[in-house]
Amino acid sequence: MKLRIKNRELRDRVYAESSAIHGTGLFAGADFNKGDYIGSYHGPRAKRNGIYVLWVFDPDDVTDIYGISGRNLLRYLNHSRPGNTEFESAELYARVDIRKGDELTFDYGDEWQDHE
């Protein structure tokens, strides 16, 4: 599967609705096996931290950190530790097998614990 699918294609794979975890959540619109590509976090570069900002780094240069201000459905991912998905840069993958209808979550990281 090609990476960085368009938002209209992402809608065939995931959907947003009310979450028992928090507000709006992101849910699997299809089954995903461990390691499957789900989608790419997309949006303009963020100049500061805020809602829907994902901080990513270049795996070849961990000092190259930048934020992406989410504009697609992936912005509705809620926090869970350890989460059933994980990011590699801005690409989201299934960390475990996920069934259609499951809420998709990821670990926001240690900094998140300061805000809970």
Image (cartoon, rainbow, N blue to C red):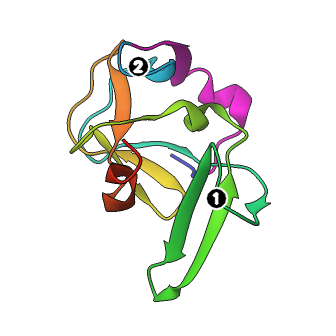
Q: Position of residue 78 (x, y in %)?
A: 42, 33
- Residue 45: in magenta span: no
Residues rendered magenta in the picture: 4-19
Residue 106 is left or right of residue 71, and the answer is left
Q: Which residue is mark 2?
A: 30
Residue type beneath disc 2: Ala
| Image height of 40 relative to 103, above or below | below
Q: How many residues crowd mark 2 within 10 Å: few (<14), some (14–19), many (20+)? A: some
Magenta-span inclusion, residue 5: yes
Up/down of 25 relative to 66, above or below: above
Percent from the top left, x then y, of residue 5? 64, 42
Q: Quadrant of the C terminus?
A: top left
Residue at (65%, 50%) from the top-left corner? 50
Q: Are marks 1 and 2 in contact (CB under 8 Å)?
A: no
> Considering the numbered disc 2 on the image, is that residue within a helix, a strand or a loop?
loop
Describe the element under mark 1 as helix, strand or loop. Answer: loop
Mark linked to residue 49: 1
Residue drawn at point x = 44 percent, y = 20 percent:
27
Across and down, in percent, residue 84 comes to 27, 37
Q: Residues within 10 Å of mark 1 (few under 14, many from 20)?
A: few
Q: CA distance from mark 1 to mark 2?
A: 31 Å
Q: Is residue 73 left or right of residue 1?
A: right
Q: Amino acid at mark 1?
A: Asn
Figure quadrant of residue 46: bottom right
